[in-house]
Image: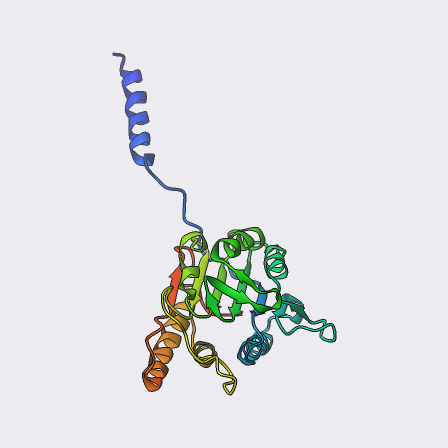
Amino acid sequence: MRPHFIARFCIAVLFATLTMGTAPPMPTTALPIDHWRVVLVAGDTAQPVFDNAIKAIGLWLGAHGVAAADIHRLAASAAPATPAIEPATLDRVLGRIADLHAQPNEGCFVFITSHGGLGIYLSRQDEMLRPSALARALKAGCGAVPTVVIVSGCYSGSFARGAMAAPNRIILTAARADRPSFGCEAERTYTVYDACLLGALPHATTWRGLFIETKDCVELREQQLDAEASHPQASFGAAVKTLPLRF
């Protein structure tokens, strides 16, 4: 075998060895998020706690620099006299999320609060929002940009797994898939989970920190209520594990 052929062959083998099995680089969140596109959903009118929560979250976002034009509010209680709030029907919720059209260096934030069961209840037209449908809408509207989804309701842990889990998504839920959450009484301002979440927002510097502080608060409140543990859940995609909580 000629020496120059041997040299070329060895170089080719070395290159193949170095590159074999190398995965494509994992997308990261090194680039700053210039601004957020937001959807807030209150799914039921049986108690005022759900409307109260999206109002409070909207005010907090506005106070932290999110433009009103980028915050879309949908509620079962929406009336023609309040055009700033859309009716929270299944088609409108999924359509609004799918139409976010997030661009590079942007982020998506979706907060949904309601009663839960085999999905999240939307009382306006007696419908259920299911994880698979939400996952499709998020893929259409947010693609691969950093996306944070908070689903507050009984049995909402089903939204933190399966099709909903993705490398660019952080998902927080109020309960495990087989556990209820608490605080839907009419005399309350917020559910237990939503109250703890709102209480943690001013202190948390990362989304993981928000999850931990909220979970600890929920556990304490449930002990005080002598209630069965709801076990809030979280899913942190590989590309957003350390995403800062900054709007």
Given residues 173 and 64, the one toward you in this image is: 173
Q: Is residue 38 above or below residue 104?
A: below
Q: Is residue 232 above or below residue 59?
A: above
Residue 181 horizontal/vertical position (percent): 41, 74
Any part of residue 194 in sight: yes
- Extreme-top residue of the structure: 1
Any part of residue 241 in sight: no
Residue 101 horizontal/vertical position (percent): 61, 54
Given residues 52 and 115, the one toward you in this image is: 115
Colour convention: rainbow
Q: Is residue 133 above or below residue 1?
A: below
> How many marks can you see?
0
Given residues 119 and 135, the one toward you in this image is: 119
Q: Is 37 left, or right, of 17 in this rendering?
A: right
Residue 164 horizontal/vertical position (percent): 45, 55
Residue 171 is drawn in which quadrant? bottom left
Residue 48 horizontal/vertical position (percent): 56, 81
Residue 58 is drawn in which quadrant? bottom right
Quadrant of the image containing the N terminus = top left
- Extreme-left residue of the structure: 1
